[in-house]
Amino acid sequence: MVGLVFVIAALSAAIGYMTAVVFNHRQLATEREDHKLSQELERKELTEFMLNVQGIASNVDEKVDRHSLNLTAINLNMAENQPTDPKAALQAVKQLVEANATLHGELTDAQVRMDVKQHQLESYMAEARTDTLTSVSNRRAFDEQMHRLFAIHERRPTDLCLLMADIDHFKLFNDYHGHQVGDIMLQRVAEAFELATRSTDIVCRYGGEEFAILMPRTKLVDAFRVAERARRAIEVMRCDIGDIELHVTTSLGVVELRSGEGIAEFIKRGDQALYSAKQAGRNCVWHEPSRAAQKLDQVMSTVADAASVGSDANSVQHECA
């Protein structure tokens, strides 16, 4: 009997593992397809925009050429008739004024059409980099901003921190309460992150229930304060769904950019810090030790009900529930 129970348990675990693998594979495939479709749509939008701009430019060029020919004709007419016919000179001046007015109107119309197209393109580009559910930046915007900040850092080294966050047990939350309720909670969590950060920080929905926040010109001690402030705000946040009051917690990892570090390694350390927060019990902020660790511990010791700092030289844990 014991052997049978063991076999059943092993089979259940294997089935669960295979299901997770298949689900993750499908999710990754879907994300790749979405990214590919997004790129194709952007290429199409940019192509259409450029064709419109070329059409407007060609139209303006044609009108300017026609105006130039009119001016040449008027000038020749004035040169031939001015000495003998004053009325012809007045008529030429009238034609010149009318030609200039016509060109001005046509150029103004072209400017209006260009402004409309520019606004349409800017709106599209903003939408392509915004998560439609939470209205924060999406993964694509995160990647672009990360490369931009690294390019700035190469020219003029400055502080940069990355905060990785994940809603605890969110898959179970979705399964129990439904995806519509889950979507509302994602929106509320995104709002909490935006309220806890500065306007210069970049809040992104990294994927699913995971968020990433890029914090330029920010030291680790300050990034930790922001992470802890966001964690506390989300912890006490309540979402009323009918007669039910729901809440969630988040796990967060914070890392500071190291000298000579690449983008992939920077993000990997952020993921590792987030994983450490989950391993520590969730609903906490985790950061790697650094030269600022001692100062960070001194500052955080003054925070109300702060957890005691561990003495492990390889890691530092704060505020773990």
Image (spheres, rainbow, N blue to C red):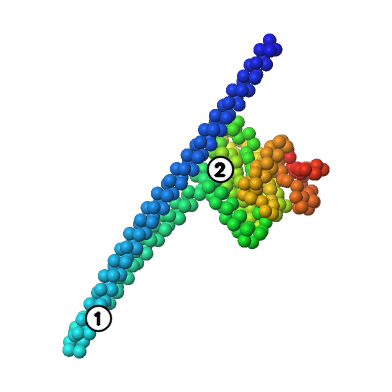
The quarter holding residue 79 reads bottom left
Whether residue 70 is situated above or below residue 81 in the rendered picture: above
Percent from the top left, x then y, of residue 122? 45, 55
Whether residue 16 is situated above or below residue 268 in the rendered picture: above
Q: Looking at the image, which is closer to me, 195 or 283?
A: 283
Mark 1 Cα-neighbour bin, 10 Å: few <14, some 14–19, many ≥20: some
Q: Amino acid at mark 2?
A: Gln
Q: Tell me the residue at 65%/39% (across/down).
A: 249
Q: Any mark on residue 75, and which?
A: 1
Q: Tell me the residue at 51%/39% (across/down).
A: 31
Q: Any mark on residue 187, and which?
A: 2
Percent from the top left, x then y, of residue 108? 35, 67
Q: Looking at the image, which is closer to me, 185 or 76?
A: 76
Whether residue 73 is situated above or below residue 150 in the rendered picture: below
Q: Is residue 180 visible?
A: no
Q: Amino acid at mark 1?
A: Asn
Q: Tell me the residue at 73%/37% (across/down).
A: 280
Q: Tell me the residue at 26%/70% (across/down).
A: 66
Quadrant in which the C terminus is drawn: top right
Helix, strand or loop at label 1? It is helix
Percent from the top left, x then y, of residue 246? 61, 35
Extreme-left residue of the structure: 84
Total numbered badges shown on the rendered structure: 2
